[in-house]
Amino acid sequence: MAVEIMTRPIAPAGAVEGLPGVVTDLAADKQAFPVPWGKAMMWIFLLSDTFIFSCFLTSYMHVRMSATAPWPNPSEVFALNVGGQPVPLILIAIMTFILISSSGTMAMAVNYGYRRNRGRTAALMLITAAFGTTFVGMQAFEWTKLIVEEGIRPWGNPLGAAQFGASFFMITGFHGMHVSAGVAYLVIVALKVWRGDYDRSGNYAGVEIAGLYWHFVDLVWVFIFAFFYLW
C-alpha cells in the first residue's frame, strides 16, 4: 500500500516563521511595500499637507462669500506701476511663470538622475532652487508693498473687508514657508548628488522624492493663484 508523505517547505536558515517572522522582518527594515519607504512617507506627508491647504482655501471661500464689507479688487491691489501706468497682476504673473518653469527644470533633474548624469542632475536642481529663491524674493517684495504702501495688515485692511489681510498673509505665508523649505531641501539633495552619494548607493530615488515635494508646492500655487488673484 502506497503511503503519502506530507512534507513542509523548509524555511531558510535563520528565518523566523509565522507572525513573529513578520515582526522580525519589519523590525529588520525589510521593504514591506512595492515602493521605497522614503517615497511612501513623502506621499503621506503630501496627503496631510493637501488637507491643510484644502481647509485654508475652503475657509477663504467661506470668508469671502460671507464678508459684509466690499472685497478688494485683486487687479487694483496687486497692480504695479510700469511707465507711470498701473499694470494689473504683472508681478503675480511673473511669479507664477517662474514657479511653473521650476517644475520643468525639476522634472529634467529627475530624468537625468535616473540616467546617472550627476553633473546635469545637480545643476538642474540648483537652477530649480534659484527659481524658488527668486519666487520667495518677489513674494517678499509683494508683502512689503501691501504693508508699507497699501497699509494692509493681518488684522485690518483700509481697502475693504478686514478678513482680506488675514486670509492673504496666512495662506501665501504658509505656502512661502513651503517654498523656502523646498529650496533648502533641493540644495541639500543637489550637494549629495554632486558628491556622488547616490552613485555609491546605486539609487537616485532621493531626487525623485525631492521632485514630488517640489511639484506639489507648484500645484498648490496654481490654486492659490486662481483663488486670490483671479477670483
Image (spheres, rainbow, N blue to C red):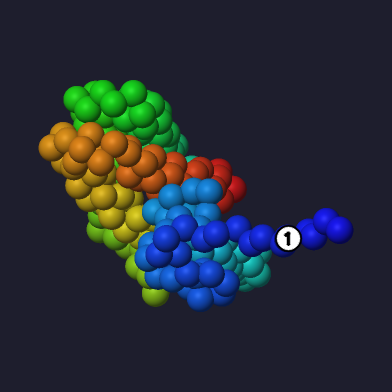
Which residue in the protein does label 1 denote? 5
Observer-nearest residue: 150 or 104?
104
Side (left or right) of 74 relative to 108 = right
Dot 1: few (<14), some (14–19), or many (≥20) neighbours within 10 Å? few
Q: Secondary structure at mark 1?
A: loop
Q: Percent from the top left, x then y, of residue 49? A: 48, 61
Question: Could you tell me which quadrant the N terminus lies in?
Answer: bottom right
Where residue 121 sits, quadrant-wise, is: top left
Up the image or down, 110 lies above or below 145; here it is above
Residue 192: in sight, yes or no? yes
Q: Residue at x 33, y 44 (%)?
A: 206
Q: Residue at x 60, y 58 (%)?
A: 9
Q: Percent from the top left, x then y, of residue 198? A: 24, 39
Q: Residue at x 40, y 70 (%)?
A: 27
Side (left or right) of 185 relative to 108 = left
Up the image or down, 174 lies above or below 39; here it is below
Observer-nearest residue: 220 or 190?
190
Where residue 24 sits, quadrant-wise, is: bottom left
Q: Residue furthest left?
A: 195
Up the image or down, 70 lies above or below 84; here it is below
Q: How many marks?
A: 1
Q: Percent from the top left, x then y, of residue 210? A: 35, 45
- Name the amino acid, label 1: Ile
Q: Residue at x 49, y 48 (%)?
A: 35
Up the image or down, 191 lies above or below 111; here it is below
Q: Residue furthest right?
A: 1
Side (left or right) of 98 relative to 52 = left
Observer-nearest residue: 221 or 196?
196
Residue 229: in sight, yes or no? no
Q: Percent from the top left, x then y, of residue 173? A: 36, 60
